[in-house]
């Protein structure tokens, strides 16, 4: 068989090109970083390089500090900073987001793993790796089935309260290390009480170094915000150890940090550990992803682009798996390091690649100086970072705008501070569900009035009532958990009418759905109104609401001539019926008067 004819070749080439283009598009959706590589402009690299160096300068000491917070050796914090950055650069949809160790995730890791490890270092590491891998798998599955919508699940006030509780717990938990004595971990108030009791045990050289570095961090943050303050504090701390021989004065040091990358480790986990790890990973997924999306969306809005929540959930999962394979722990969107990337001019996720390369070079060739880093410096970095995490302005804003949401924020904060981080997740979730149910079971409603021409709006916005008519709008579907509330509100609207209405127009434009209970409630109201001589009319029924009216037979009971396409046509029909009734009454009066005259 000979080669294909030139004509045949010309025919198949466009289809081959189209197939290749479709494959590239599908691959870009799966791995957004590939499109960034193809469209990358050489003039961006200088900005990404500077931003990457800045991120590495901040992320390295913070990663070591967060390793301490989560209960790991310092080098594990470095592993957790490097591998997730590379994974997110390829699979994430945000251009600025830096995925790194996060305070809330670290706190949940410690509270989940520590009770199971019972003091064994190897078991602690195995459980933490298993927890990280499990969290990654849950994120990948969740993102694949469209579960990225959980980013909207925790309301901002509840998430703020949760993170504020984490911040205060970190600050109190690090006070002992800052001052040079050990404090048993516990709730916020218990730990604070123990710190106060043991304040006389302060190791003064340690306290002087720690407090001095903390003040340096705050000063740099205030007056020189673009300088990598954690790196400066770490360098100053190491220099002080060398210059003043602080190690011989009782100042605790980080100690030996092994160079090089770790070999992958298969964690050994017993069956009894599975459910606690699953429970902990669900909490981490919920909190870390919601927190990450808050950061990612904020910087995406600032820089004028959109992000894909489901893709980012998958990317977070792959970042966690990359961290777990590299013997690291769970990560999230790091707001402080993302802010550094953005303020330093980072254009793309090449910033993260550069930061990972720089930290890799430190891990391979420059770990020796890290051995002289005082642990009080890490405590100072954690306390300073936690103070940046605490959002007092938002709490004050919630108090001013919404007292219920302010209370939810405070309850979430106190839950974390008193009963622990992981139970605090449950409190945050329970509050979110309660808030959702309260809003859904008692939705907003309004009575409408005439504004001008065919425009009708709520009375609060200038709508004028029409005598003999109530126009009512319910801002929710009518379903089993709000059906009774709907009936109560309709009765109240009738009761509060200045003149007993002849018609009750239900404006269904804000009522997208109706279940069986809701249909029964609407029929019950129809019967009640009819017994009082009031006609029920429905305007702007559409979608599932209209379908349920038809399937339940309510459209026949109400009367198809009482279903109107909009409020204006319903009002016109009411006015016409009133005029006709008035004319009929006048006609009867005239006829009666005429008959009376003839009889006389």
Image: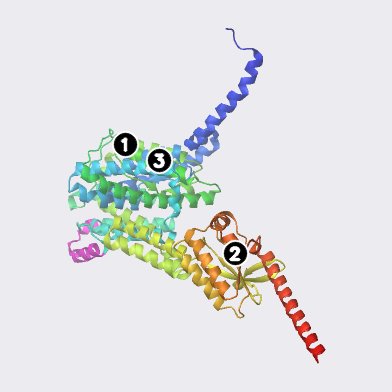
Region of the chain picked out in magenta, as a range: 189-206
**Label 3 crowd (10 A; few <14 / some 14-19 / many >=20):** many
**Percent position of residue 225, x then y:** 44, 54
Q: Earlier in the sequence, mark 1 or mark 3?
A: 3
Apparent side of residue 105 relative to residue 293 in the rendered image (left or right): left
**Percent position of residue 325, x then y:** 31, 36
Q: Main secondary structure of the magenta part?
A: helix
- Tell me, yes or no, if residue 216 can be seen here: no
At 67% from the left and 66% from the top, the residue drawn is 570
Compare residues 478 and 339 and report the one nearer the observer: 478
Q: Earlier in the sequence, mark 2 or mark 1?
A: 1
Which corner quadrant holds the N terminus?
Answer: top right
Which residue is denoted by mark 2 in the rendering? 558
Magenta span includes 509: no
Q: Quadrant of residue 527?
A: bottom right
Compared to 144, does 432 lie above or below? below
- Tell me, yes or no, if residue 293 can be seen here: yes
Which corner quadrant holds the C terminus?
Answer: bottom right
């Amino acid at each position: 068989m000979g080669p294909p004819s030139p004509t045949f070749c010309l025919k198949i080439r466009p289809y081959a090109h189209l197939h290749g283009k479709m494959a590239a598009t599908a691959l870009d959706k799966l791995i957004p970083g590939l499109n960034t590589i193809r469209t990358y402009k050489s003039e961006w690299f200088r900005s990404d390089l500077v931003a990457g160096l800045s991120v590495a300068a901040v992320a390295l000491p913070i990663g070591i500090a967060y390793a301490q917070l989560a209960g790991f050796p310092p080098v594990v914090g470095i592993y957790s900073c490097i591998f997730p950055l590379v994974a997110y650069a390829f699979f994430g949809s945000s251009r600025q987001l830096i995925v790194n160790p996060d305070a809330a995730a670290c706190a949940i890791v410690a509270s989940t793993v520590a009770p199971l490890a019972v003091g064994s270092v190897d078991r602690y590491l195995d459980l933490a790796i298993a927890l990280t891998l499990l969290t990654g798998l849950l994120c990948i599955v969740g993102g694949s089935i469209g579960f990225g919508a959980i980013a909207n699940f925790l309301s901002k006030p509840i998430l703020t309260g949760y993170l504020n509780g984490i911040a205060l717990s970190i600050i109190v938990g690090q006070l002992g290390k800052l001052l040079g004595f050990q404090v048993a971990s516990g709730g916020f108030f218990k730990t604070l009480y123990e710190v106060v009791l043991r304040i006389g045990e302060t190791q003064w050289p340690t306290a002087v170094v720690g407090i001095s570095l903390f003040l340096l961090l705050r000063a740099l943050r205030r007056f020189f915000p673009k300088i990598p303050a954690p790196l400066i504090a770490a360098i100053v701390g190491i220099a002080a150890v060398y210059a003043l021989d602080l190690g011989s004065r009782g100042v605790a040091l980080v100690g030996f940090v092994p160079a090089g990358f770790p070999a992958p480790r298969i964690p050994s986990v017993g069956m009894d550990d599975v459910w606690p790890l699953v429970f902990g990973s669900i909490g981490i997924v919920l909190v870390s992803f919601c927190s990450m999306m808050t950061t990612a969306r904020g910087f995406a809005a600032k820089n004028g682009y959109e992000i894909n929540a489901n893709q980012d959930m998958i990317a977070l999962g792959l970042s966690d798996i990359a961290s777990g394979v590299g013997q690291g722990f769970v990560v999230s969107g790091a707001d402080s390091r993302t802010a550094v990337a953005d303020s330093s001019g980072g254009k793309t996720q090449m910033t993260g690649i550069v930061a990972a390369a720089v930290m890799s070079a430190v891990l391979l060739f420059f770990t020796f100086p890290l051995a002289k880093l005082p642990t009080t410096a890490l405590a100072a970095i954690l306390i300073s970072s936690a103070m940046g995490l605490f959002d007092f302005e938002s709490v004050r804003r919630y108090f001013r705008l919404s007292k219920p949401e302010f209370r939810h924020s405070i309850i979430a904060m106190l839950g974390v501070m008193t009963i622990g981080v992981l139970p605090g997740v449950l409190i945050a979730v329970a509050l979110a569900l309660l808030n959702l149910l309260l809003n859904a079971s008692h939705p907003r409603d309004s009575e409408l009035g005439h504004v001008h021409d065919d425009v009708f709006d709520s009375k609060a916005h200038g709508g004028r009532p029409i005598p003999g008519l109530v126009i009512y709008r319910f801002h929710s579907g009518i379903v089993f958990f709000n059906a009774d509330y709907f009936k109560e509100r309709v009765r109240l609207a009738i009761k509060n009418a200045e003149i007993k209405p002849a018609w009750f127009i239900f404006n269904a434009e804000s009522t997208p759905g109706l279940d069986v209970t809701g249909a029964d409630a609407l029929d019950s109201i129809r019967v009640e109104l009819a017994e009082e001589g009031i006609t029920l009319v429905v305007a702007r029924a559409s979608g599932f609401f209209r379908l349920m009216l038809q399937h339940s037979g309510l459209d026949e009971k109400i009367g198809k001539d009482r279903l109107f396409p909009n409020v204006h046509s319903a009002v016109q029909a009411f006015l016409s019926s009133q005029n006709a009734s008035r004319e009929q009454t006048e006609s009867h009066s005239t006829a009666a008067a005429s008959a009376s005259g003839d009889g006389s």
